[in-house]
Amino acid sequence: MNERGLVDLFSAMNSLTGSALECPHYPCHFEGQDCSLCYCIFYPCFIYKFGDLIVSSKGNFVWSCKKCEWVHRKENVEEIVTYFSSFPRQILVEADWEFFSKSLQEILFGFEVGQRVGRSYNLMPANFKFSKCREVESGSFLGVKISGAEIRLVKELHEFEDGYILIPRKFGNTIVGYDGSKFVECDL
């Protein structure tokens, strides 16, 4: 569970903070950003439009949101707070990563784009949404295992396996994965 993100969400549900000018890291994304959700409730979102899977200086995989501005735009913060205000807080406290991923997709696209495949959650369709894609002869994608908000394992896959969050592989500004019927390469 992304506990710090949940604390920020509950605080924002009471009152938006706007720009945290007193923060020593301000602006961490852009001047005038809304800092109400300093710790994103959707972390790790695994949507390349907002971040990237990188290897940290300690050698661990992490989801980097360094270039994400979406959750710090006032209109998006307001939409997120409105969306989650319809849920009892206890539901949010008990919710898992998949619940918040589905919520993000509903906010972004109006409906859930990802899909459950056996005991895995396929997030490749959400990554391909609104991208220019072309079929490729073969490819691979990534299977990710998380615990709370921490990435525990990343594995290259050529076919669906149970127990993973399935995301495309990224090469520069291109992602490669499986769209449900064929391998595709898409521009970010």
Image (tube, rainbow, N blue to C red):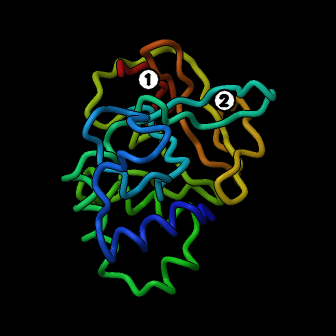
Is the residue marked by circle 1 packed among few (<14), some (14-19), or many (20+) residues within 10 Å? many
Residue 112 position in % (x across, y down):
35, 58
Task: State the separation of the CA atoms marked 1 and 2.
Answer: 13 Å
Question: As shown in the figure, which amino acid type bears the numbered disc 1?
Answer: Val
Which one is earlier in the sequence, the residue at label 1 or at label 2?
A: 2
Residue 20's place in the image compared with 64, above or below, is below
Residue 3 position in % (x across, y down):
60, 66
Residue at 55%, 47% (x, y): give it.
44
In the picture of the structure, the residue carrying the numbered disc 2 is 158
Residue at 59%, 61% (x, y): give it.
2
- Foreground of the two, 115 or 3: 3
Residue at 46%, 64% (x, y): give it.
8
| Residue 40 appears left or right of 72 | right
Residue 45 position in % (x across, y down):
49, 47
Going by the picture, which residue comes out furthest to the front? 22
Whether label 1 touches label 2, CB < 8 Å: no
Q: How many marks?
A: 2
Q: In the picture, which quadrant includes the C terminus? A: top left
Report helix, strand or loop for mark 1: strand
